[in-house]
Structure formats: structure tokens, C-alpha cells
Amino acid sequence: MPFGLDYQFGRSDVLDTYGVSLGLSKGFGNGLGVNLNYSYRKNDTGNDEQRVFLNLFYSLPRQRQSIVASTNINSTGSPTNQVTWNYNSRKTIGGINASVGALLGSNNYGITSRLDYTGYRFTTNLSHDLNILGGKNESIGNLTKLTFGTALVFADGHFGWSRPINNSFALVVPNQNLRGQIIGINPSGGGYTARADSLGSAVVPDLSSYSVSSLRIDASDLPLGYDLGGEIYNLLPSYKSGTLIRIGTEATVFLRGLLLDAKGEPVALEAAEVKSLSDPNWQPVTLFTNKVGKFALDGFKPGKYELRINSNQQNVIHFEVPPKQTGIYDIGTLKIPVPVK
């Protein structure tokens, strides 16, 4: 039960003003509830102002709809009654929100309607208001308005297409071999905050300046063998700034095969180091065999490699991933030249 009280001292010929307000609310279950607010105020002309606001609402969470009926009664004018239906899409981005309302006063009535759409790269709003005024000044007013907003951002040599920027932004640019793949930013039950796809890189347009923001990268439909790299990035943007984040690597191959020793027996439960002979910047990885000598490892790309067991110069195998190879590549059987010690 909120309660408010205020008093303001006037100066010269301006009178003191003061007011009091009281609110009551009650929920009845099944989405039904009521709010009642009363306020009294003495204005600077010495006149009393009283207002009563009654709000009855019914919510349907599963359908994401609500109906609100309200009555506004005040001592300075005629009462007004309003009924509004609202619908909120389950999708935060990519869904349509709508509302329709009817207003009835003592001498006028009207209808309002709204459609809102927020996409990854633009926002739009369509509204129409009908207002009919009765009495001696009878008139009919119609107002239709369409708004559209989009943005083009630039950071560290890269452009991005986005919905309007509110403060700071992050531009998430996938590696060249990931272009066209759907990569989402900050997944939730309502979808993604931003998305990289065939239309370009992802732009997160609403980062708060001087506040730490975490971006989580999601690519559940990424083809097997492709490497997304890091999945979580923490940012501290400055005032109205842009931050570039590069994601993904050149990996396109999921490698699997069978490792045998010099006698043709499976090399079971053994670790081996794999280095690239084609790319000096490629970080070595550790390969593990199972009980029957089989192995599987992602993060590879076309090129020549070296497999070494126990750092033994003699236990070295060279193999190659063919050019333009993507997805699963079964290299077959690799046989080490000398027995494993």
C-alpha cells in the first residue's frame, strides 16, 4: 500500500502547494487484479485537485496477452474510461508486439492501435489514432504514423548493419570460413540479442558505457569440424564507443583415424602431440587414442601435419589433410615406424 506526501513552499505571491496520495492493489489469482489510486493536491492558485484512478487488469501469461480497463475521475474535468488489449511476442528480437485501445470520455471517444517490430538490423512502428470530438466543436481526427530505424556501424576497419544504437556497441565479426553461418549472441528463451548470418556480422547495439558486459557466443548449428574459438567475452566499453570482436578460426575439419604400432597392433590409451608443418601459428594439440587405438579430434584445416609419440624423434608420423576438405575426414590407419616404449 504505497503512501506519498509532499509540501512545497511558495515565494512572493505564489502560494504553498502540498499533496497526498494513496495506492491500493490486490491480485485475485488466475491473472486478475485491481489497482486503486487516490490523490489530493492544493495547487499554487489555492484550488483543490482530486483524482481517483481505478485499474482492472487480466493477464494471460501463456498467450502473452493482457487486457486493462481503467477509469480516471478528477475534480477538474470529466471522467475518462479506457480499455486496452496488449500482445507481447515470445521473441525479444524478430517478434511483433501489438496493442489496441478504446477511449471513452463525456464528450469524446477514440481508438488507438500499435504494431511494433524489432529486428536484428532495423526497428519499425506503425500506429493509427482515431479521435472523435462531439458537442458544438464536433470533429473527427485520424493520424497514421510509420517510423523506421536502422544504423550502419564501423569499428577497426569493419562495417556492420544494425538496429539503432542506444549507447555503445559491439561488432562481432566471424572468421571468413564462418561467413553465412548463423551465430547468435547472448541466447535466451526469447532468442538472441544479435545475430551474424548471411546479411553480415552481428551488432550488439545497447551496451552500457563504463559497465562490464558479457557476450556469449552460440553456434549450435555450426558444421562439424569448424571451430568457434572463445565463447564468452567480457567488455568494458567507454562512452559511446564501438568494440570489435573477431570469432572463429580457420579450422574446418574433424579428423579421425586408427593408430597402429610397428607390429600392426593398436596403440591403446596413448597420447600424441600433433603439430602443423604448413602453419607455424597453428597451436599444437594433444591426441588421445581409445582402447582399440582409434582417435578423433577437431580443429584441423587443410595442410601437412606431424604426429609424435612420447617426444621420440623416431616415433613420428607425417600426414596431410587435403585442400578444401571440410567436415569429417577419416585419415584411415597411421602406423608408427618403431615400437612404442
Image (cartoon, rainbow, N blue to C red):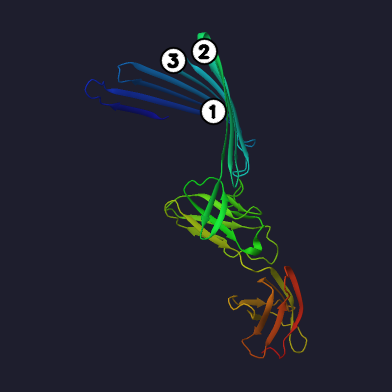
Q: Residue furthest top?
A: 136
Query: What's the residue at 57%, 53% (across, down)?
Result: 160
Which numbered dot is residue 217? none
Image quarter where the C terminus lies is bottom right
N-terminal of the two: label 3 or label 2? 3
The residues tagged by marks 1 and 3 sit, at their Cα atoms, a distance apart of 27 Å
List x then y, in percent, for residue 319.
Answer: 71, 81
The image quarter in which residue 147 lies: top right
What amino acid type is highlighted by mark number 1? Gly
N-terminal of the two: label 2 or label 1? 1
Q: Is residue 144 left or right of residue 314?
A: left
Task: Report the front residue among 159 and 193.
Answer: 159
Observer able to see residue 85: no
* In this view, the mark in front (3 or 2): 2
Examine the rendered structure and indicate whether residue 96 appears above or below residue 83: below
The residues tagged by marks 3 and 2 sit, at their Cα atoms, a distance apart of 11 Å
Q: Which residue is mark 3?
A: 77
Q: Which residue is mark 1?
A: 33
The image quarter in which residue 138 lies: top right
Q: How crowded is the residue under tag 2: few (<14 C-alpha within 10 Å), some, or many (20+)?
A: some
**SS assignment at label 1:** strand
Task: Report the front residue among 172 and 25.
Answer: 172
Q: Which residue is mark 2?
A: 107
N-terminal of the two: label 1 or label 3? 1
List x then y, in percent, for residue 70.
Answer: 52, 22
List x then y, in percent, for residue 24.
Answer: 45, 26
The residues tagged by marks 2 and 1 sit, at their Cα atoms, a distance apart of 29 Å
